[in-house]
Image (tube, rainbow, N blue to C red):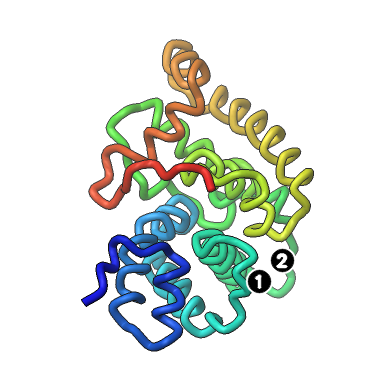
Amino acid sequence: MADFASLTDLELFDAWTRGDGRAAGELFERHYDAIDRFFRNKILDGYDDLVQQTFTACLESRDRFRRDSSFRTYLFAIANNILRAHFRARRRESERFEWTEVSACDLAPGPSTLFREKREQQLLLESLRRIPLDYQVVLELYYWEELPGPAIAQIVDLPENTVRSRLRKGKQLLEKKMRSLARNTEELESTLEDLEQWARSIHASGDPQAAPPLARE
């Protein structure tokens, strides 16, 4: 019996395309937490359905995976497309919006379903939901999933320079939003002082589904 835990994603993917359901199960277990986390700070209700749709779409489109990216990048690209399709389907026919202008909170009002004990973490989560969706996506992929610029560019289907510009502007928008939501100066300064560390701590702590941080690809 193959030791699936020791196989790379691409080796598992190859086994999956040959019909090995155990390889598919290992891939699902390996990446479920990250895809779940991707949706949970953007969708308040039914995010579990979108997680399932992502893996179903991966199965259905596996013959189109060209291996010019990691499997993880490919999976996040599917998740990003499903997220956008979900929000487009919910809008009224007369409603128009730009992803660089509308936030997850605008599209799905309410508090984040990713709760954390530390107020700095919760401030960060709520602020992320209140900046435009395109900026929220790239910031979370960069900080939470520790993906590099080229991988994020493939996920969101934009030039790498554009992604780096959005990371810079996204951080500025995030800090501005945190200033408006912070309860006091001490809380704000604590979060801003080490924004990157607080962002990554959301990935790794307080959630039984959270996995240890992954190295950048």
Q: Amino acid at mark 2?
A: Glu
Q: Residue at x 56, y 25 (%)?
A: 180
Q: Residue at x 47, y 38 (%)?
A: 126
From the image, tell me which residue sits under label 1.
Answer: 92
- Residue placed most toward the observer, 133 or 89: 133
Q: Residue at x 33, y 39 (%)?
A: 204
Residue 186: numbered disc:
none
Does residue 138 appear in the picture of this structure? Answer: yes
Q: Find the distance from the CA under tag 1 to the CA under tag 2.
A: 5 Å
Say left or right for 29 vs 139. left
In the rendering, at what x and y percent does residue 110 appear?
A: 45, 49
Tell me whether circle 1 and circle 2 mark residues in contact (CB < 8 Å).
yes
From the image, tell me which residue sits under label 2.
Answer: 95
Q: Tell me: residue 14, above or below residue 126.
A: below
Determine whether the residue tagged by mark 2 lies in a helix, strand or loop. Answer: loop
Q: Where does the N terminus fall, quadrant-wise?
A: bottom left
Q: Amino acid at mark 1?
A: Arg
> What count of labels does the image hold?
2
